[in-house]
Amino acid sequence: MSLTMPAPDPQLALGLDHPLRVLDLDGSRLPSDVLDPHLTDVDETALTNLYVDMVRVRRLDTEAFALTRQGHLVLWPPLLGQEAAQVGPARALRQSDWVFGSYREHGFALLKGVDLAEFARVWKAYAHGGWDPHEITMAPAQIIIGAQSLHATGFAMASKMDESDDVALACFGDGATSEGDVNEALVWASAFQAPVVFLCQNNQYAISEPVRVQSGTPLALRPTGFGIPSMRVDGNDVLAMHAAARIAFERARSGGGPTFIEAVTYRRGPHTTTDDPKRYRDEAEVEAWTAKDPIERVERALAAMGANMDAVREEARIRADELAKELRHAAEHAEPPTVDSIFDHVYAQPTKRLERQRAEHRAFTASIEGNR
Amino acid sequence: MKTFLLPDLGEGLTESEVVAWRVAEGDTVELNQPLADIETAKAVVELPSPYAGVISKLHAGEGETVAVGAPLIEFDVDGTGGAPAAPADEAAPSPEAGPVATPEAPEATGEQAEAEERSAAAPAAEEPAATDGAEAKPEKVQVLVGSITVHGGKPVRAKRAWEVEPFVREEKRGPNRAMPPVRKLAKDRGIDLQAVRASGADGLVTRADVEGHGSAPVAAPASTREKVTGLRKHTAAAMTQSALTVPHAATFHQVDVTETLALAKAGDASFLALAARAILLAAKRWPDVTASFHADTNELERFAHVNLGIAVSTDRGLVVASIDEAEAMDASALTAAIKDRAVRAREGSLSMAELTSSNITISNVGVFGVDGGIPILNPGESAIIALGAIRRLPWEHEGQVVLRDVCTVTVSFDHRVLDGREAAGFLADIAAVLERPALALAR
């Protein structure tokens, strides 16, 4: 038996020098040997749908941000600038595929069909999980950095054992790649050839820490050390993201194991509504990335394809307005949970001990003046 | 008309500063249109309009600090231009709603506290070195996310919950436990394990315990310990704090209360209520007896009203129930109020306000048959009056020695607030009215 192991194959990583891209900044279509075969069915209608999705995701984000400033929500981690990196993969998923996201995966939640009333409760701190994960096949927002990558890998391993072809999508940021959880998930996914796709939205900052101080190599090179193929993709190119996700999901579904996608993008807003990004980055950097706006790029592409852009914009605006109105209503009218409800979700079936604690708690609250 | 109250724009902030207005009164604005730049302890943020309508009033000027929850902007959203329901008095902003002064030490939030701990490691002077008589003032220091307040080289932060009230685990002794062989032994002998006195660690029943069970009477323990909880624990903490932080002094007076007692027997007012009237009249002449000394700021707080605390002994411990604004009540109203407080104290149905609002306390220790003692002050108060038992004693009266009803009245006081002269004057005034209730007419 040989003791030598094969060295990591740099060919496992695509796009290391130049992120894979099919839509140029001016909207023109660039050829790509890797991605083009997976975009043959994407016509003007499909691209218009992706455009409307991105406009709706952006509106969800900006409205929630405003609602937080107005005191109707308590915290919001904005995704402004990352719309393509979420919409592209989200629209490559089947409904039975699961998403395991961080706390910034609002685009996935929206496109997975989350109930906005339940969604608003999460960011009003009225609910721990908010939505029913089984209903929309998306796990609750994960605050522990990178932990969801293990959940996704576990789900994928189970899917493989069940001989199902459902895949898991783990979404995390650049900072999470420095965490043990993500590295453990890569080990297990590789060892079990689990049907999981790791989507790293490299938005350049782990709160205030630039990605360059976290890694001396492109993040997409890291998974190759675990024997996992990866793609470095322009995260502001919705078509490239869509195609890369299709490749990864197809590989996972057909027994090819995990894939890692690094979406090179940028978080144009603050880390959350309580962060002040001016303290750690230049306005010029934000402006440079604003010029690479993922939505305007698609507008240019659609215009070049001869679409009636006035009609498309109007359609997107109407749908976004409806969404914003619904979200505002949900945020303003959310009912706070009863204190008693803290016992509801500890176990699927309440235990005797839990029931006793609930009874004690009720007796305690009843003893407080005003609750009698 | 809609009033927009300043929300908490960070996590756990108490106030924010208006840096700049982007709109003026009378402007028409759209939903989510930027209205102002607001600086919190964490960031300067843009405030989007919560309504579409006309700005009818801006409650704060640029550079002013506004408390979270205070009105910031009035909107006319229905287009009627109607006046606000309660027209604001422009000349005198209400203390609640108006801009607040920059506090000396804003409370730090959790995130700030972390930042503070980091900055505490900065190579600043380790101790707040006494600087030539000039007192160092707290200053705001910018850190990566927000700002913190530093005083004497150390960050100022709010006390953590466990610093305010130490966490004490209350152990509950569960049922007796035993190893399986011992359980079998007990079962074989028909002995109830729970009836066996456990000698092992953590209440473990040993084989010897089972074997010795029933052979010898179990001696009563020399002492027992019981966890102190609830009101008893609270009383213990309050009394310790008061006794250790307040320099107590006391003064006594034996008073011939024959006339007051006769008055109580004749009318519908209790002796305690009449004594309370005498105390209230004396408190009017010596207003500092209801003052409160704040050692942290070296301030004396004086109150507009006398909130008379009545110490009530209950099954669960001692409580002081307040009769607010007692100075405005007559003796029969006081009688009813005292009875009400006593009944509800025993029921446990007093509100937190009633349990904490008193500023002077009466303790009727005479009901226990004693003449007095030196009561410990209710925390935050400057005087407590103990009424002793009323005894028939030989007493000088109009040149004769006769049997009279005599009561010892004690005043314990905070010597930082009151000196002996004031405490004695206060007590003498109480005694004078109790001896000659008719004096009340003159006071």
Image: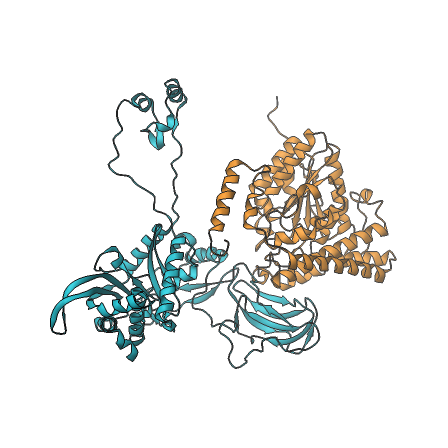
Chain colours: A orange, B cyan
Q: Nearer the viewer, residue B292 or A236?
A: B292
Frontmost residue, B278 versus A363: B278
Asked if residue B161 can be seen in this view, the reply is: yes
- Residue A309 % position (x, y): 84, 60
Query: Which of A149 and B230 lies nearest the eye of the viewer?
Result: B230
Residue A39 as seen in the image, left or right of residue A60: right
Q: Is residue B419 above or below residue B155?
A: below
Q: What residue occupies the far right of the structure in this picture?
A: A306
Residue B39 pos. (x, y %): 55, 67
Furthest-bottom residue in view?
B91
Question: How many marks do you count on the picture?
Answer: 0
Q: Residue furthest front?
A: B266
Task: Where is residue B88? Give x, y as percent.
Answer: 56, 78
Position above or below: A372 against B51: above
Q: Is residue A100 above or below residue B409?
A: above
The structure residue drawn at horizontal position 25% and vertical position 31%, both measured from the top left corner, is: B219
Q: Specify the farthest residue to the top.
A: B188
Place of residue B336 in the rendered image (x, y in percent of width and height, measured from the top left) = 38, 64
* In-front residue for pair B63/A27: B63
Residue A184, by quadrant, is top right
- Report the quarter where the N terminus of chain A lies: top right
Q: Residue at x 39, y 53 (%)?
A: B165
Q: Quadrant of residue A253?
A: top right
Q: Is residue B403 left or right of residue A2?
A: left
Residue A23, visible in the rendered structure: no
